[in-house]
Amino acid sequence: MQADATDDTLLISRQGRLGRLTVNRPKALNALDITLYRAIGAALAAWRDDPEVETVLIDSTSPRAFSAGGDLRALHTLALDVGPDAAARVFRAGYRLVSVLAGYPKPIVSFMDGITMGGGVGLGAHVRHRIVTERSVLAMPEVAIGLTPDAGGSYLLSRVPGLYGLRLALTGGRMKGGQAVVAGFADRMLAASDLPDLATALARRPAGEVVDLAPAAPREGQEDLAAINALYDAPDLATIRDRLARSDAAWAAEDREAMALASPLSLLVTFRAWHAARRLPDLNTVLEQEYRLIGNLLRLPDFTEGVRAKIVDKDNAPRWLDGAALDEAAIEACFAPRPDTLDLPFFSEPV
C-alpha cells in the first residue's frame, strides 16, 4: 500500500488499483471544512488521468459517522468574525466538489457507514456506487439551523418518489440505511462487517463487478407514501401544517413538532426550493440554486442563531425571525442572484 498524508484529517492511500480517501476527524463526527474539500478535490484531480487508479473509495475512520456535515462551529465563527460572504465561500468549495464527484469519469464508491448528514450526503450520495449499512443514518436537517437542504441534497430530495422528499426536507427527518436505498440516496445496503472485504476486493477488481456481487442486506420500507402524499400535496406550507394538525397519525405529530422547532424562514424557503428543484433539469442547476439560497440566508440572523442554540450554547432555544412578519418579498430575496456564482469546475480545476 502506498500512502501519503497531507493533513491528518484526510488519509490518502493507494491499494492496488484503488485510490482511497478516508476522512479522519472522528471527534468532530468527520465534519467537513474547506481544508478537506480542497484535499479531496486535489486527490481526485491527481487520480483522474492516473492509469494505475481505476476506482476511488471514500470512507471514514469512525464507525459512528461517515460525516455529520459541514463544520458548523467553524462556519458560525467565520460568519460572525469575518462575515457571511466568507462562510459562503466554504459552502461554494463544497458544492463545487459535489459537482466533481457526480461527474467523475472513474467509478467512485462511498461507504456511508454511520451518521451521514448535510455535507456528508454531498460527499457520499452523488457518486456512482453508494453503500449504506445497518449503522447508517441519513438526513438533511438544515431547517433546524436556519438554512435549507444543500450540497445537492435538495436535488436528491426532489427526486424521491411522491412527496416523501418534501417531508424529509421540511422536518429534517432521518432515514435508516434501507430507507435511504428506497429513497434514492444510496444504491445498496450491506452489513458493516462486510465493508473491509469489499474494500479489499475493490483493490483487485472492477467496482461494478465487486459491488454487484456483494451480498445485500434487506431493504427497509418507507412509511405509508399515500398518506404522506395526501397531507403534503398542498399549494403552500400553511396548508400542510394545518393538515398535520388535524391528523391523528403519530408520524404527523412528529412532523408538527419538528417544524415547530425549525426556522420559519427556512421552512418557507425550503418549501419553494423543493418544488423549484423538481423542475430543474440536473444536479448542477440545483447546486446553483442552492448556492444562491445559502449565500442569501447566511446574511440573515437565523443561521448564526440556529448554530448558537443547537451547537454552541446548546440551549435549544433559538430566537428565530418572526414567521408572521415574513412576507413574499422576504422569501423572494432568498432566491435573488448573488454577485458571485458557483462557476462549477472542470475536473482539472481546484475546488
Image (tube, grey):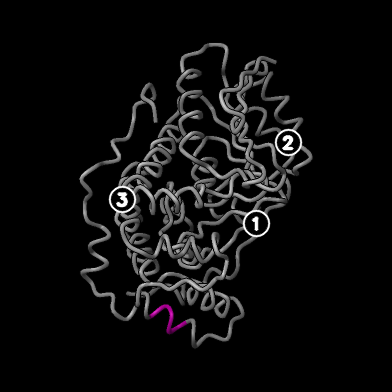
User: To which residue does mark 3 refer?
Assistant: 289
Q: Earlier in the sequence, mark 3 or mark 2?
A: 2
Q: Position of residue 188 (x, y in %)?
A: 64, 43
**In the rendered structure, which amino acid carries the disc numbered 2?**
Leu
307 or 197: nearer the eye? 307
The magenta segment:
239-243
Q: Say which element carries label 2.
A: helix
Q: Residues within 10 Å of mark 2 (few under 14, many from 20)?
A: some
Disc ID at residue 195: 2
Q: Is residue 119 above or below residue 207?
A: below
Q: Position of residue 164 (x, y in %)?
A: 50, 64
Distance from Cα at disc 3 to Cα at disc 2: 35 Å
Which of discs 3 and 2 lies nearer the camera? The answer is 3
Distance from Cα at disc 1 to Cα at disc 2: 17 Å
Main secondary structure type of the part rendered in magenta: helix
**In the rendered structure, which amino acid carries the disc numbered 3?**
Gln
